[in-house]
Image (tube, rainbow, N blue to C red):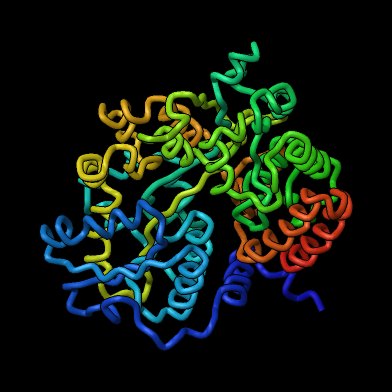
């Protein structure tokens, strides 16, 4: 029986998300216990990324000192924090007032009624200056009902990083807006140009947010898509196969050793240590490459994400703040978000922790701060332009049934993307052909599509 396939997209999102994300809520409390009805404290559950850890260090001496609101932080690794957030928010347990959510989760959570709309807070808090938030970020954190449910803490897109000195020594020139075919030709030319240096580093590590993130942007610009507008799975299409073969062949021929086990962290290390001449990945990587003490500081060039059939192909991602619908402290929660994602916080980080640590990629005004522009001169404008030009609603050459550039904005994608990534990683490792990997991947995608066809 296929009654589920006749539901509306909104109902499907709700049903699928509950089935995918709900888990029994563990009988344990985060730091500080449950939310305070008195409003003198809030509980924040967040990922343990360096920018968040810095925020935790600065909160008591600045936010709490100024507002009197104590913030009880629970800080966990990404996989763990996603699980804990989904448990608490799906059950509307109200244990946490605020959580770090990405532009993948926020529209899904909003559709299920798990989040507090931020529009009224934004309207009253004119000092926050929502117009200063980069428009793609605001759009990505706005749900189908037209309401805003998240504020970005920092944002990123993707671009190509390359060793300027290596290309110059080989008499090669990087185009201002390269195609993937041009990148592949350059990778072949510079592979082995220095002892132990490979032409390019590309993620091969399994994970919907690892290998599938860059690969999906390649699929988009080669003319492919996970699903067409009618929810027909298209992983066995000519375009999807061409893009995947290109990616797998490139990393196998001219990519890093152990590519099937290489993710963002491994490619960053390879680029920093001079083991690779090019790297296509998150714009956030540039801050580490240009940091004081980096062996490649000043040697890297940055150009937009390579393309083929589209004008751009950079992804869009943000760690953002969302307020749980069940929170009894929404006013204090907003005050925290307004501070953490505000202009003054960026200046505070620059002064206290160094301008390279500023959580950038969300505000237009960040790129007008002289100190930040000096620190990030090599990559600031390319990053800003990549984010500004990202098109999560229209990332390819055909209409899509759900938003997303490097992901498909449906609850099932975490599982689907991870399973498909395992097949792709196996092909990168040489354990199976791309055709074999995509044949299996197509069946996985078809099973998901059945839930949405005819909606």
Viewer-closest of 423 and 306: 423
x 59%, y 65%: residue: 10
Q: Is residue 455 visible?
A: no
Q: Is residue 60 visible?
A: yes
Relative placement, left or right, of 422 versus 299 is right
Q: Position of residue 69 (x, y in %)?
A: 16, 67
Q: Position of residue 273 (x, y in %)?
A: 53, 37
x 82%, y 79%: residue: 1
Relative placement, left or right, of 318 versus 128 is right
Q: Position of residue 112 (x, y in %)?
A: 51, 70
Q: Is residue 337 above or below residue 15?
A: above
Viewer-closest of 319 and 93: 319
Q: Is residue 318 above or below residue 7?
A: above
Q: Is residue 39 above or below residue 318?
A: below
Q: Position of residue 421 (x, y in %)?
A: 71, 56
Relative placement, left or right, of 330 versus 309 is left
Residue that protrudes farthest toward the front in the picture: 195
Residue that protrudes farthest toward the top in the picture: 171
Q: In which quadrant of the rendered view does residue 8 lie?
A: bottom right
x 67%, y 53%: residue: 261
Total residue callouts: 0
The quarter of the image holding the C terminus is: bottom right
């Amino acid at each position: 029986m296929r009654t589920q396939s006749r539901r509306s997209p909104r109902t499907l999102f709700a049903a699928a998300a509950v089935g995918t994300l709900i888990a029994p809520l563990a009988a344990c409390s985060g730091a500080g216990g449950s939310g305070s009805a008195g409003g003198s404290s809030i509980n924040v559950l967040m990922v343990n990324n360096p920018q968040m850890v810095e925020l935790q260090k600065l909160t008591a001496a600045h936010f709490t000192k100024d507002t009197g609101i104590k913030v009880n932080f629970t800080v966990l690794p990404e996989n763990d924090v996603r699980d804990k957030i989904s448990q608490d928010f799906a059950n509307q347990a109200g244990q946490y007032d605020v959580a770090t959510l990405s532009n993948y989760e926020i529209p899904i959570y909003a559709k299920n009624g798990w989040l507090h709309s931020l529009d009224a807070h934004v309207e009253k808090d004119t000092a926050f200056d929502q117009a200063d938030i980069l428009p793609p970020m605001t759009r990505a954190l706005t749900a189908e009902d037209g309401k805003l449910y998240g504020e970005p803490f920092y944002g990123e897109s993707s671009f190509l990083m390359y060793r300027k000195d290596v290309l110059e020594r080989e008499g090669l020139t990087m185009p201002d807006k390269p195609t993937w075919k041009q990148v592949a030709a350059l990778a072949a030319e510079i592979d082995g140009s220095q002892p132990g240096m490979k032409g390019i580093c590309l993620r091969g590590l399994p994970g919907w947010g690892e290998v599938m993130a860059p690969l999906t942007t390649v699929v988009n610009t080669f003319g492919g898509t996970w699903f067409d507008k009618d929810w027909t799975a298209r992983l066995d299409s000519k375009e999807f196969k061409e893009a995947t073969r290109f990616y797998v062949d490139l990393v196998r021929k001219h990519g890093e050793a152990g590519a099937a086990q290489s993710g963002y962290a491994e490619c960053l290390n390879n680029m920093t240590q001079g083991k690779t001449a090019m790297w296509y990945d998150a714009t956030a990587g540039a801050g580490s490459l240009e940091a004081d003490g980096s062996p490649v500081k000043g040697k890297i060039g940055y150009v937009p994400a390579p393309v083929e059939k589209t004008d751009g192909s950079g992804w869009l991602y943000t760690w953002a703040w969302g307020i749980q619908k069940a929170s009894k402290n929404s006013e204090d929660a907003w005050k925290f978000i307004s501070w953490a994602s505000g202009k003054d916080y960026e200046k505070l980080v620059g002064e206290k922790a160094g301008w390279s640590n500023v959580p950038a990629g969300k505000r237009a005004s960040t790129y007008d701060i002289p100190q930040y522009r000096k620190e990030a001169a090599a990559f600031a404008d390319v990053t800003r332009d990549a984010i500004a030009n990202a098109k999560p609603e229209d990332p390819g050459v055909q209409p899509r049934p759900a938003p997303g550039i490097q992901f498909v904005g449906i609850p099932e994608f975490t599982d689907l993307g991870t399973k498909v990534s395992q097949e792709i990683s196996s092909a990168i490792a040489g354990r199976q052909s791309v055709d074999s990997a995509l044949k299996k991947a197509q069946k996985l995608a078809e099973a998901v599509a059945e839930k949405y066809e005819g909606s």
